[in-house]
Amino acid sequence: MRIAIVNDLKLAQLALSRLVLTADDGEVAWIAEDGEQAVTMCAADVPDLILMDLIMPNLDGVEATRRIMRNSPCPILVVTATVEGNLSKVFHALGAGALDAVSGPTFNADGSLKDHEPVLRKMNTIRRLTQPVPELKALRKRSSSGSFPPPSMPAERLVVIGASTGGPQAIVDTITGFSEAFRPAVVVVQHLDEAFVPGLVEWLSRQTGWPAQPIQAGDAPEAGTIHVASSSDHLVMGLSRRMRYEPDPKDLVYRPSVDVFFQSLKRSWPTPGAAALLTGMGQDGAKGLGKLKDAGWGTLAQDEATSVVYGMPKAAAECGAASAVVPIDQMGARIERAWKRLAAAAESSSDAGGS
């Protein structure tokens, strides 16, 4: 695994170089001392992984991540002196395409590495995430009409969002695209270390102006609130319309899994709402989105041009799970339109049944 290091501090470069050599098949591809060098070097030699600092001269880690993901994309792990002290920049970097973030290693008095195990664990996880996955088979003939089947019964509705690489900013762009009058319950499953969820919740609330909260077992969705999955176990919706976490299936590398949550909604939530699959690596969420489409939900996927990584939404589009594929600046309005269309169809059906 060829790993690049981007850090302006010589001591950090030394610590990270030593750490890379302790990883399985790890080798240092190159070292850049600031974001500008990293962008240039990555364009000439794309590594398997970049360990990206945040605070650097000339060009910081957020903008370097954004440019690399646009011009020569590759997996990026933010490794900075303190994640907690740079939470705002961390979430901007995750929104720009970084896969994860972790505080960097230091040296003990005897010269050995200290606090390096979390970095190694995240490197190994990223190695698993970036392995090729088999293509999904088509669920049905792909529809280009963007129309959604009517629901079978009227009831409270949800907006559910699944996202991964680049997801935090895409989630913000989606929710800020809603009109002032549209305040549904929103449930978000974002691939993210559970340690960062409280910071993500705070960041989402600040960026969108909506109240946001981490989901605790037993919570029920509330209108006008962003609910964020907050465990490395899988979020599921129970028959009581209350959410909980389950460890199974344990072999899924994506935790929490969008597929698991979406599929639980088909079983447990009686009235279709709107579901969106945003930017992200891999295929998680495509099968679940197809299940929701079968159940009458409005299903949308982000388009390639506006995705940081066109993996998850591409899988949904290609297998026919998404009724419409739209750019992120239109996602909020399209979700709102789908949701209102379903509500109007349910009301019309109810009126017809009572006449």
Image (tube, rainbow, N blue to C red):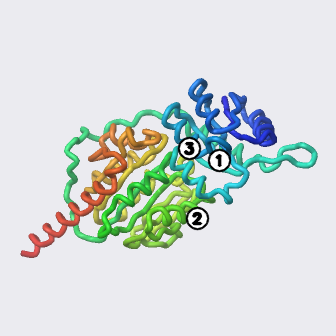
- Distance, label 1 to label 2, CA atoms, is 20 Å
Q: Residue at x 68, y 28 (%)?
A: 29
Q: In this figure, which residue is indicated by the disc labeled 3? A: 63
Q: Secondary structure at mark 2?
A: helix
- Distance, label 2 to label 3, CA atoms, is 24 Å
Q: Residue at x 59, y 24 (%)?
A: 44
Q: Secondary structure at mark 3?
A: helix
Q: Are marks 1 and 3 in contact (CB under 8 Å)?
A: no
- Residue 326 seen from this side: yes
Left/right placement of residue 288 relative to residue 129 reads: left
Q: In this figure, which residue is indicated by the disc labeled 1? A: 54
Q: Is residue 295 above or below residue 56?
A: below
In the drawing, what numbered circle is on residue 198? 2
> What's the amino acid at mark 2?
Pro
> What's the amino acid at mark 1?
Leu
Left/right placement of residue 355 relative to residue 95 reads: left
- Distance, label 1 to label 3, CA atoms, is 9 Å
Few, some or many residues within 10 Å of mark 1 (<14, 14–19, 20+): many
Residue 222 x %, y %? 40, 73
> What's the amino acid at mark 3?
Glu
